[in-house]
Image: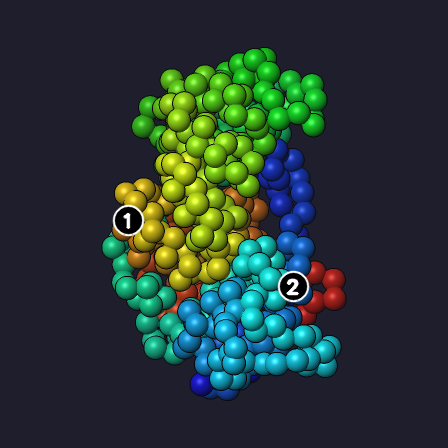
Amino acid sequence: MKITSIRMMRLWGPRNHGVGGGAAKIARVVVRVDTDAGIYGLGECDDFMGVRQGIAYLDEYFRGRDPFSINAIVSEMLYGTQAPNPAGAPRGPMGKNNINAVSMCSPTATPWGPVVWAASGVEIALCDLLGKALKTPAYNLLGGKFRDHARVYLDRSSPDDITDLGAWEKMAAETVASGFTQMKFDIDFMATECVQDVWNRSLSLRQINRIVERLTVVRQATGPDFEICVDCHMQYNIPDAIRVAQALAPLQLLWLEDPTPITNPDSCAQVRAKSPVPICIGEMFIAEQFRLFVDAGACDVLHPDVMFCGGMHELRRIADFAELNHLPVAFHGNGGALATIAAAHVGVASRNFLGLEYHFIETPWIGGFVRRDVPLFRDGQVVMTDAPGLGVELDREVCRQHLAPGESLFD
């Protein structure tokens, strides 16, 4: 069996609860890997700058390659190989657009950024494809499952009106009532009326006090046993990240996420040393970046994303590395239904898995552009089935309704 093409389809539509509240627009990029055996697999990428160019490169570079060699060809894409390079590796211009093949390193000379984001979606599709070919669920490609379901936590960001304590209470109560047992809010959007200088990485005491006030309402609404975590989006300086963590300590948060810019493990380690709240990092990291932060003592929870780390096998490799260091993993989730299900397959196959993030509970089409035998969520979890691959097919009508301009459905 050989890869014959890698195609993409961009979906576009409303996001009914954007970051920081309010309505927004969002795109999803669906990837399809086809073979000469008539078997295909589906994956998902985020619509970041350079991703679609990366998929176009992969379409040319992986044609004629063996889809069973998932780890080898994805590793080749991210890290390159020594000369004379693997048999079948393209050389020189590829395809009608004369895309130049690069074999000695990744196409961008670095193993992160758009190249790994594009490769992640293709790798997910390859796992779906191989599961279908072998007639087994994708989690069995990863060694089998420890559990039958993957816990989900909702990213709620903030209500539209952050000054309305009743809106915080309502959002929390609705999440509990819907069967979920964990949710996350965004520190940087919780008290924006208190920000005096948007260029400064500081948190004023007034801002911290409003954050604590609003999260206290959330805690009161959920009760003492519900897990709450908060995200700083890499925004803050060391002393103020410590100060907000200490102010939030009585609320028994599960974690404080990405408190400082993630280019420097030392700053994050300084926050962790004085924070009473566990530190979670890594939504954009590849495996090597996690090693740097773990070695620096900079984190308590590893937080990779299947769409950004290199796909399902790399996600599992990161989880295993965390387990060897006696650390848990939670999976960041910036994807729609397809990426969520892919990450859930890895979650059930990882011993130290805590939960999987989902951003789009208020936007039905993002959770509905693929169909499976059971609902996407049941009692706050993704329930596994024995369907082959990822166990999904595109809902062609939902996809048709949300095709971006110039796009067409896969035939």
Q: In the image, what residue occupies the spot 61% across and 33% down?
A: 20
Mark 1 vs 2, N-terminal side: 2
The kind of residue tagged 1 is: Leu
190 with respect to 253 (left or right): right
Residue 73: image x %, image y %?
48, 73
Secondary structure category for the residue under label 1: helix
Is residue 261 depicted above or below 403 in this figure? above
Q: How many labels does the image show?
A: 2
Secondary structure category for the residue under label 2: helix
Is residue 185 depicted above or below 399 in this figure? above
Q: In the image, what residue occupies the spot 46% across and 40% down?
A: 281
* Quadrant the C terminus occupies: bottom right
The kind of residue tagged 2 is: Arg
Find disc 2 in the rendering and name its residue. Answer: 52
Find disc 1 in the rendering and name its residue. Answer: 324
Nearer-the-camera pick, 30 or 141:
141
Residue 374: image x %, image y %?
39, 58
* Quadrant the N terminus occupies: bottom left
Residue 242: image x %, image y %?
47, 22
Nearer-the-camera pick, 339 or 385:
339
**Residue located farthest toward the left when viewing the structure as drawn:** 146
Q: Residues within 10 Å of mark 2 (few under 14, many from 20)?
A: many
